[in-house]
Amino acid sequence: MNQPVPAQAPDRPLSVTLASVETGTRVRVLDLAVERSIARRLADLGLTIGSHATVVQSSSTAVILAARGSRLAIGRPLAREIVVTIEPDGGTP
């Protein structure tokens, strides 16, 4: 009998966009699918690939994150371009 193929490879974390994450969820950034200048600005603000953040608030217009001791407001269109994985048990700082 054939085994079903998993939707996501077991060695890769499930990825979602930041715009789809609920308030109170801790995430790790997997990819910034944005222009280089925007990626640099996000890095200046503490949001880089591999960094951890917590969604403090999510509204129809923006996502507010707590990351590296700061709070960042990310517009929803930009949040749709940031790929994250949800950290189990709160993740690691």
Image: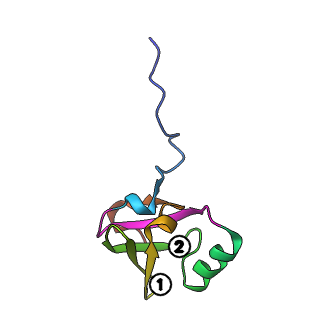
Where residue 85 appears, as percent x and y from the top left, is 46, 58
Give the colour scheme shown.
rainbow
Q: Residues within 10 Å of mark 1 (few under 14, many from 20)?
A: some
Amino acid of disc 2: Ser
Of all residues shown, which one is farthest toward the right?
36
* SS category of the residue bearing label 2: loop
Of all residues shown, which one is farthest toward the bottom?
69
Where residue 3 appears, as percent x and y from the top left, is 45, 20
In this view, the residue in front, 51 or 2, is 51
In this rendering, is residue 14 above or below 2?
below
Let me know if residue 25 appears in the view: yes
Where residue 77 appears, as percent x and y from the top left, is 48, 65
Q: Which mark is residue 45?
A: none
Counting every numbered tag in the picture gives: 2
Determine the image quadrant of residue 33: bottom right
Residue plotted at (54% across, 61% down)? 81
Magenta stretch: includes residue 28: yes
Q: Which residues are magenta?
A: 22-34
Q: Which residue is mark 2?
A: 51
* SS category of the residue bearing label 1: loop
Q: Which residue is mark 1?
A: 68
Q: Residues within 10 Å of mark 2 (few under 14, many from 20)?
A: some
Residue plotted at (36% across, 61% down)? 21
Describe residue 13's horizontal placement relative to residue 43 as left or right: left
In this rendering, is residue 37 above or below 32?
below
Q: Earlier in the sequence, mark 1 or mark 2?
A: 2
In this rendering, is residue 29 above or below 45?
above
